[in-house]
Amino acid sequence: MVSLTMIWDAMTQIYTAQTIRAAVDADREALFAPYIVGRSERWSCDTRTKDLVCIGNWLCAELTKIGLSEEDRRTQEWRYNRESRSDQDLFECAAQIMNDSINKSIEKNRVGHRRWG
């Protein structure tokens, strides 16, 4: 038996890790280009760094495209920067952020902690 919660989750989840991977892979070089400006021709990075940068740039553009305010867009980008440090699947992390943004489930009044002082 399927619960109503499962049906609701399936209906509201527009972005998945697979759809984001396909979108990023289709435009990977353009998404990564700003990051490599000014670096030597022999410079290279690992796959996770490239994914991290490409998804971050894609996320910025996509959040703007869905019409979030500047403050909400920055909040969601900061969330990606925080969560991507510990998440194993960056694409799943981005999918969760996009789905929360569409559902207007954006954290408000978050106070960062101070590490020093």
Image: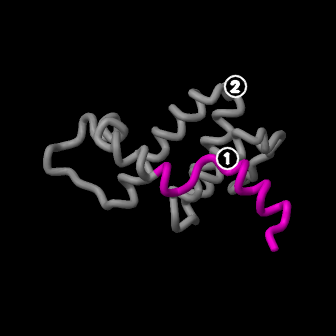
In the displayed orientation, state which residue is furthest to the bottom.
Answer: 1
Q: Which residue is drawn at 61% across and 57% down?
A: 83
Q: Is mark 2 on a helix, strand or loop?
A: loop
User: Could you tell me how many numbered marks the image carries?
Assistant: 2
Tell me which segment is drawn in magenta: 1-20
Between 57 and 39, the one lying in front of the other is: 57
Residue ID for mark 1: 99
Q: Residue at x 68, y 39 (%)?
A: 75
Query: How far across and down, in percent of the image, does residue 116 sit?
Result: 69, 55
Residue ID for mark 2: 69
The numbered disc on residue 64 is none
Question: The residue under label 1 is which amino acid type?
Answer: Asn
Quadrant of the rendered structure where residue 28 is? top left
Q: Residue at x 57, y 65 (%)?
A: 87
Query: How far across and down, in percent of the image, does residue 103 sit?
Result: 76, 42
Is residue 12 placed above or below 60 in the rendered structure? below
